[in-house]
Amino acid sequence: MSALPTQLPGTAQDNPEALRERLDTTTAAYSRFVPRQFLNLLGIEDIRRVEIGQQVERKMTILFADIRNFTSLSETMSPQENFNFLNSYLIQMEPVITAHGGFIDKYIGDAIMALFPDSPDQALHCSLAMLQRLDEYNDGRQRAGYRPIKIGIGVNTGIVILGTVGGAARMDGTVIGDAVNLAARMERMTKEYRASILISEHTLYCLDQPDLWLIRFLDRTRVRGKQGTQSVYEVLNCEPTRLREAKTRNQKRFEQALAYYHIDDILSAREQLLAYIATVPEDTAAHVYLERCEAPNEGLDNLRAELPYVWRDDYAIGPAVVDSAHKGLLAEMNALARAINSSALDLTLQLMANIQAAASRDFEIEQQLMEEDGYPFVDLHSRQHTRFFEFFAELRGEIQNGEQDRVYLAFRVKRLLSGWLVNHILSADRHYGHYRNSKRREQAKL
C-alpha cells in the first residue's frame, strides 16, 4: 500500500487565500491577548516581530477600576458563578473603554487596568460612561434578583515605559513607572472615602479642558517608596444632581475643615465638619473625616501636621541654575506661609509678587534648557507650569479679596504652592534631569 501524500492538492497548505485568511484569524486571536493599540505604540505592525525588551517612553493616563467588596460577594457564589459574573461585568466595560480612546492593558482579578495614550480628559469621560453603564447593568441584575454592585475608579497621568517583559517561553506587554503605582493608589482610596472617581494632582494639572470638570481637593497621601505627599481630588460630575450642587456650593467650607484636620487641630476640624455635615449630610468623605476626628490616632497614613517643606539635597536634579532657582522659589513660598501663620497678611501681596516673578524666571530657565536638550516632554512640562499659574492666581485672588482664615490660607499655600513645587521637582523635573544626564553620558562616549 502506497503512503498517503503529505500535502493534498486544494488544501489550505497550498491555497494563498486560505493561508491569508488563517493568518488574519490568528492575528485577530492574538490581538485579544496583546492589544493592537499596544503594538502600535511600540511601532510594531506584525505581532510576530514582538521581542523581549522592546519599549518606548511616553505620557499616559492610567485608569484602575475595581468592584467594591468583591471578596465577600464572591464567597456567596460557586466558582462557575464567579466566572460568569466577572465576565458579564467585564463585557459591559470593555467597549466603553475602547469608545473613549483607551484600551485594556490587563485584568487583575475583578480589577481593570486601562491606558489612555492621548488625553486625561478621555479617561474622565470614560469613567463617567463606565458608571452610567454600571447603572444599566445593575438594573438588569436587580431584575434577575441579584444585588447591585459598585465600583471605584482611580486615575493618574504621567510618563511611563511601555514595553515587553518576560522570558523565552512567555512574555507580556506592560507599563512600568511610578505613575502606575499612583493610579492604583487612587483606586484604593475610593474604598476609604466611598467615592466613585478619584484623580491625582498630575491628572488635574494635565487636563485639556479643566472647565468641564467639577473637582474638589480630598486628601494628601503618601505612596510607598516615594518622597513627599500627593494631593488627591474627587471628581463630582458623576454625583446625583442635588448632591453635586451641594458639594460644589459648600466646597470652601469642606476644605476649611480639612485644613484644620491636617494641621492637627482636631477639635476645630470636628466642629467645622459637624457644621458642614448638617448642610450636606450625604457627603461620605466628610463622615470619613469625622470618624478620624473621633479616633485621631488612626488618621490615614499619619499625614496630619506635616512638616513645612525645606530644601533638601536630593531635590537637586543636575543643572545648578535650575536647582538654585527651585531653592529660591521654595524659600519665597515658605516666606508667604510664615507671614500667613503669623497673621502678617499685610505682607502677603508683596510676597505673592515675589513668587510670581521667581516662578516665571525658574520656568523660563527650565523650558530653555529642555528645548536646547531636545527633551521630548517639554510640552507636558510647560502645561504643568501654566496650570500652576492658574491655581496661583486663584489663591492670590482669595488673599486680595480679604480671606481672613489663616489656617485655611496656609494650607492652600502649602498644597498649591510649596507642595506642588516639591512634587513637580521629584517627578517632572527629576525625569528631565535623568534625560539630560543620560544624554550627556551618551555624548561623552562619542
Image (cartoon, rainbow, N blue to C red):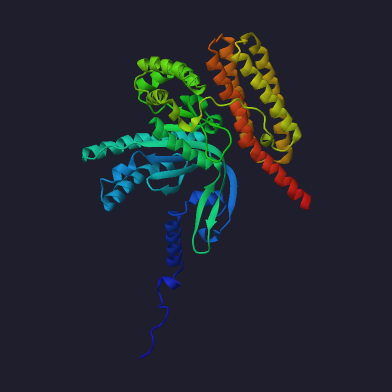
Please provide percent x and percent y for residue 166: 52, 58
Please provide percent x and percent y for residue 438: 70, 46
Q: Where, by quadrant of the figure, is residue 338 drawn?
A: top right
Please provide percent x and percent y for residue 114: 46, 43
Quarter of the image with the N terminus is: bottom left
Q: Residue furthest front?
A: 297
74 up-or-down from 23: above or below: above
Q: Where, by quadrant of the figure, is residue 380 drawn?
A: top right
Count of numbered marks: 0
Q: Is residue 170 left or right of residue 419?
A: left
Please provide percent x and percent y for residue 125: 44, 33
Q: Where, by quadrant of the figure, is residue 347 drawn?
A: top right
Q: Can residue 207 be seen here?
A: no
Depth check: give the residue in front, 370 or 359.
359
Q: Is residue 106 left or right of residue 150?
A: right
In the image, what residue occupies the spot 26% across and 36% down?
A: 139
Depth check: give the residue in front, 290 or 172.
290
29 up-or-down from 301: above or below: below
In the image, what residue occupies the spot 38% across and 89% down?
A: 2
Q: Can residue 141 be seen here?
A: yes
In the image, what residue occupies the spot 49% across and 51% down?
A: 36
Q: Is residue 346 left or right of residue 40?
A: right
